[in-house]
Amino acid sequence: MNPIARRYAGRNVPRYTSYPTAADFSTAVGPSDHETWLATLDGRQSISVYLHVPYCREICLYCGCNTKMAVRDQVVSSYRRSLEAEIGLVANLIEDVPDIARLHWGGGTPSILGLDGLTSVLSVLGRHFPLDSACEHAIELDPRYVTAELADGLAALRVTRASLGVQDVNPLVQAAIGRIQPLSTVELAARRLRAAGIENLNFDLIYGLPRQTRESVRETSALVGAMEPDRIACFGYAHLPQMKANQRRIDEAMLPSLDERIEQAELISEELVRRGYVRVGIDHFAKPNDGLALAAASGKLHRNFQGYTEDDEKVLLGLGASSISTFTQGFVQNISDVPRYIRAIEAGTLATARGCRIEGEDRRQGLIIERLMCDFAVDLAAIAPGVDFAGELSTLAPMISDGLVEINGTKLLVTQAGRPVVRIVAAAFDRYRRPQSAQFSRAV
Ligand SMILES: C[S@@+](CC[C@H](N)C(=O)[O-])C[C@H]1O[C@@H](n2cnc3c(N)ncnc32)[C@H](O)[C@@H]1O
Ligand code: SF4
């Protein structure tokens, strides 16, 4: 990384998977807004659906996801029944029911529901919402639990894409993060999914983990690249022990320094690009003919709560504890605490905890932030003709004089040197953000 950009890299900034970000949601938006927004959906426009399953067999030390250890199967099936009840509740509030064009199971580890559980949820969903015949149907999977039976069952449920949590293949790193998963386990999971006909595979990697070194991440990316998944997401380890109790068990003395993190991110990128992957946004890589790479090349890439996506649906219904829904009017998030979520659903009410309205200025700022995060460039006049961005540009003045941002007429361009710190450029357009907030992870 350019030494000047490095000076900015330690700042804590949001990942901008939405704007306003989830950190800016409040109880000023609640169930009655959620109801109104559902009632006004336009059935002629298809939607995306996200189903959250907040359970895993065991909890990895580094995990920052909203998940818990499933101590008993009964806990998981009780959650599944609430998820099904929520689908019915939400659908009953929609007058003009739209088709589902994209469906994503996230977690946690959604396959913990078992094939019967997944089938049951899908049949409830299908009873309430027409599923588009070409629906992209994706699921997040833990490679350690991908049996041949699961792979075949998912294919029968018309799953089209699987994301596998790989993180790192080095045994020392795996021991330090409490996730023992030999490379052969990932290879076998990928083989089983491909044999079942699920050929669109995404792998997740993380850098900045305890005991990772430049050599270990280079080796991980070479071994992972050789398996040729269509997409690889490469996240910087977000260490927030004040919020995640499991992360307190990570020995901070073993965490790589900021300089080391930066080197690791660059080495992974070099290795994957050398193997023919195209860089997409700040943390994704895709084969050149993959939909994500094509969307990036044509300015059609978007951001959503899963990161980068080709999904251009305007509405995303989030179902399950902690899930976030996007409407044209704003965002709503469900209660994260599972027992409270279940109680709300059992009482026959929506489980909305908080949210945020997208008001005039937010819409414009959100579009600018999304283009910056996706294209590293934005034409301010094309998004907001006649609006004066003097305040934002003066915030960016140091980055402009440092050669990280260029202004050409009304166009703002993040230079190659500035790309690793694009989140800081985006933050200049974020009216909610105070610099140096400790609630976010590092820019790199
Ligand atoms: C829901 S998990 C993926 C599916 C499955 N549970 C698994 O772990 O294989 C989502 C992904 O989030 C990423 N992740 C989790 N905690 C993280 C953290 N603290 N920092 C960065 N990435 C993290 C990991 O790459 C992980 O694969
Ligand atoms: S990384 Fe995946 S398997 Fe590990 S605790 Fe988080 S959600 Fe569960």
Image (spheres, rainbow, N blue to C red):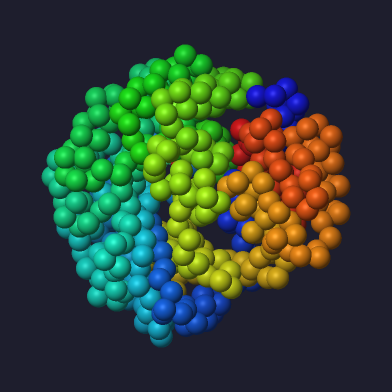
Please say if 381 is above or below 269: below
The answer to whether residue 174 is left or right of residue 158 is right
Q: Residue at x 31, y 48 (%)?
A: 161
Q: Residue at x 42, y 38 (%)?
A: 288
Viewer-closest of 122 and 65: 122
Please identify the quadrant where the C terminus is shown: top right
The outermost residue toward the bottom is 95
The answer to whether residue 190 is left or right of residue 14 is left
> Can residue 337 be seen?
no
The image quadrant of residue 85 is bottom left
Percent from the top left, x then y, of residue 429? 73, 53
The image quadrant of residue 98 is bottom left
Viewer-closest of 441 and 184: 184
Q: Residue at x 22, y 68 (%)?
A: 123
> Can residue 426 be seen?
yes
The answer to whether residue 385 is left or right of residue 118 is right
Percent from the top left, x then y, of residue 21? 61, 55
Percent from the top left, x then y, of residue 314? 50, 67
The answer to whether residue 292 is left or right of residue 18 is left
Percent from the top left, x then y, of residue 237? 52, 33
Q: Quadrant of ligand 1?
A: top left
Please say if 328 is above or below 410: below
Q: Residue at x 40, y 83 (%)?
A: 96
